[in-house]
Amino acid sequence: MLDRIRSRRGALEILDQRLLPGKISYVKARTPAQTAAAIKDMVTRGAPLIGCTAAYGYALALSGKPPRSAAALASRLDNAAKILKAARPTAVALAYAVDRLHGKAMNFLAGHSGGLDAKTHAALKKLVEREAAAVFQEDVDANAALSAHGAGLLPDGCAVMTICNAGAMATAGMGTALGVIKAAHRLGGISQVYACETRPYLQGARLTMFELMREKIPSTLITDNMAAHIMKTCGVAAVIAGADRIAANGDTANKIGTYMLAVLAKYHGIPFYIAAPAPTFDMTMRSGKDIPIEERSSHEVCFIGGVEIAPKGARARHPAFDVTPAKLITGIITEKGVISPVSRANVRRALGASATRVFAREKTAQTC
């Protein structure tokens, strides 16, 4: 699969997913602000991947000539963290990665409150870059583990449905929901994948089909409003989606349209799974009602590929995510295992120490 992000010589090269599958091109970011702009403008997307991108983008704040004092550098890093975390509000992996690196950097600087020489700055830069690489590798490992757990849930030779893109293009590794599908296919367990096109940004049509076809997995693209008919007539055995943020009770925010699939799956008696790594959980959110939902530009609804499809001046809404209630979710597939039934107690039990770390991370975030 294509490199999604590449850290090279003081810059971050970010695969421009807006141009796929027609063109492979990279956008170069040299500052945290440029990285944040790439995340906000959908150059890169997918909750785990924007977390990894933000981590490397935060490290860019340490490029170039260091300031004279630790206080000045702390101010620069504070600003970098705020800019990056504001890029997109719903996906918690972004805040998780930035807070993690920022915490490491602040702890380091607390021990160097005096002057800041070149050697000390270089040591901090190395520490932060190493932590960004760790965030990336942990996602690779989590993808592999949760994909193996999820593959065991699918019957041999089954048809599945998915929405948006929760594959390699959305993560550092093989993917979450699409990772499960890939792992099951390698075991001979997938006869057909129905990929919802995912309006308005068409991540399913452009990116999920791109990945499925490259992997030679039998797949069919459907428009979002075909989902019920396909569930009813084509023997869909499971629906699998990714997640951008999961509340403490298991309510899950994911790409707009996911909630609709969960309701349809429930009606048709089809298991509905969420696949997501541990950093996707936000234990400070008691339920899905607390999850912030990003409202993006109506331009993305009224235009496709630069072509206006609605009458000029038409009003449109674009909530980029919706929340699926835990009671509609058969199981949440994580690198630690499958959470089923989905409940507050089972989420905390499955996450274990991770639940405490997530809570501590969010408390730290409020002070940045």
Image: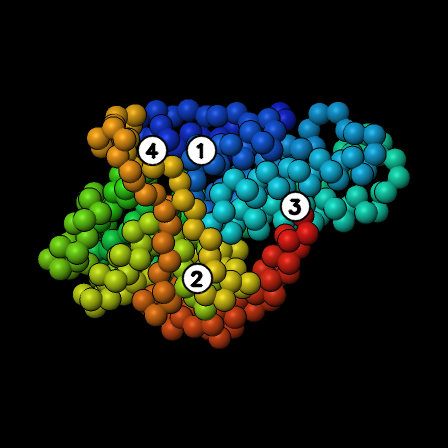
Question: Which residue position holds label 4?
Answer: 299
- Mark whose residue sits in front, 1 or 2: 2
The residue shown at (51%, 51%) is: 92
At horizontal 34% and vertical 30% (from top left) the residue drawn is 20
Q: Specify the quadrant that holds the N terminus.
A: top left
Q: Residue at x 18, y 49 (%)?
A: 225
Label 3 amino acid?
A: Leu
Q: Is residue 87 visible?
A: yes
For marks 4 and 1 on the same chain, the one whose residue lies earlier in the sequence: 1
> 150 or 274: which is nearer to us?
274
Cα separation, mark 3 vs mark 1, equals 23 Å
Q: Earlier in the sequence, mark 4 or mark 3?
A: 3
Crowding near pointer 1: few (<14 within 10 Å), some, many (20+)? Answer: some
- Of mark 4 and mark 2, the one earlier in the sequence is 2
Amino acid at pointer 4: His
Q: Which residue is mark 3?
A: 101
Q: Is residue 81 left or right of residue 65?
A: left
Which label is found at residue 24?
Answer: none
Dot 2 and dot 3 residues touching (CB under 8 Å) = no
Of marks 4 and 3, the one in the foreground: 4
Q: Say which element carries label 2.
A: helix
Residue designated by label 1:
41
